[in-house]
Image: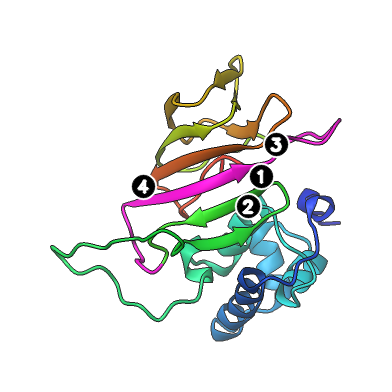
């Protein structure tokens, strides 16, 4: 039976960002003529998880969000509804304070910058990471591309496949080959805030259960 670890890591939400995701996910699936079962097979998510997301009955972790995009064969940013056009050659896009697309996840708050610009070579995102709950295990996952993470506030633990964890303090940064499985989480029992910039990824992804 297909299961989804993220199911137990979600919280219900009625915020506008979740409503947009729910409506957009269903609209994309319908437009592509896909059944929920087919999306489940492609994404590795449980049918019940996809159904709950479309009905806005759960807020997915970023890992779940990324898998859903993969199942729908779209970029993660395509699940954020927008009426703005693609950045033209030679053009400049500006993001003002408060204009980021906010996605509430069970273990992080993501603020995606320039979400209205599709097919970007870089995907900049602010993330506020929550400290893990006692006994909670977060999977390490890799993806295409490279990524840069700068700690803006707090302490962050970077878990890497086949390597000792790295601890980053405010002002510290890390640059890595995203194909190496990894995960970021707030350390020292307090939330942390980071800036993550991914480049050349398969789906605009980065390393929390919510950026890998």
Which residue is pictured at 38% across the width and 61% down the height? Answer: 114
Q: Earlier in the sequence, mark 3 or mark 4?
A: 3
Q: Position of residue 207 (x, y in %)?
A: 56, 40
Is residue 183 covered in magenta?
no
Q: Earlier in the sequence, mark 3 or mark 1?
A: 3
Q: Which residues are magenta?
A: 116-139
Q: Which mark is residue 139?
A: 3
Give how far apart the Cα atoms at labels 3 and 2 are: 12 Å
Q: Is residue 120 above or below residue 16?
A: above
Q: Is residue 100 above or below residue 210?
A: below
In this view, the residue farthest toward the top is: 164
Magenta segment, prevailing SS (helix, strand or loop): loop
Give how far apart the Cα atoms at labels 4 and 2 are: 18 Å
How many numbered markers are drawn? 4
Crowding at dot 4, Cα within 10 Å, few <14 / some 14-19 / many 20+, comes out as some
Q: Which mark is residue 62?
A: 2
Q: Quadrant of residue 191?
A: top right
Q: Which residue is mark 1?
A: 209
Q: Are marks 2 and 1 in contact (CB under 8 Å)?
A: yes
SS of the residue at dot 4? loop
Q: Which residue is mark 4?
A: 200
């Amino acid at each position: 039976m297909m299961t989804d670890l993220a199911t137990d890591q979600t919280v219900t939400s009625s915020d506008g960002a979740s409503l947009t995701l729910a409506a957009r996910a269903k609209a994309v699936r319908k437009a592509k003529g896909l059944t929920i079962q087919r999306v489940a097979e492609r994404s590795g998510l449980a049918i019940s998880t996809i159904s709950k997301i479309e009905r806005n009955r759960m807020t997915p972790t970023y890992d779940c969000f990324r898998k859903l995009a993969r199942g729908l064969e779209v970029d993660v940013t395509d699940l954020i509804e927008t009426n703005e056009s693609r950045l033209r050659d030679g053009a400049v896009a500006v993001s003002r304070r408060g204009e980021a697309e906010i996605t509430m996840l069970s273990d992080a708050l993501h603020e995606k910058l320039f979400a209205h610009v599709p097919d970007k070579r870089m995907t900049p995102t602010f993330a506020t990471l929550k400290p893990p709950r006692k006994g909670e295990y977060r999977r390490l996952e890799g993806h295409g591309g490279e990524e840069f993470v700068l700690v803006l506030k707090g302490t962050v633990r970077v878990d890497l496949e086949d390597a000792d964890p790295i601890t980053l303090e405010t002002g510290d940064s890390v640059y890595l080959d995203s194909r190496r499985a990894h995960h970021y989480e707030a350390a020292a029992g307090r939330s942390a805030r980071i800036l993550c910039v991914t480049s050349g990824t398969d789906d605009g992804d980065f390393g929390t259960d919510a950026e890998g």
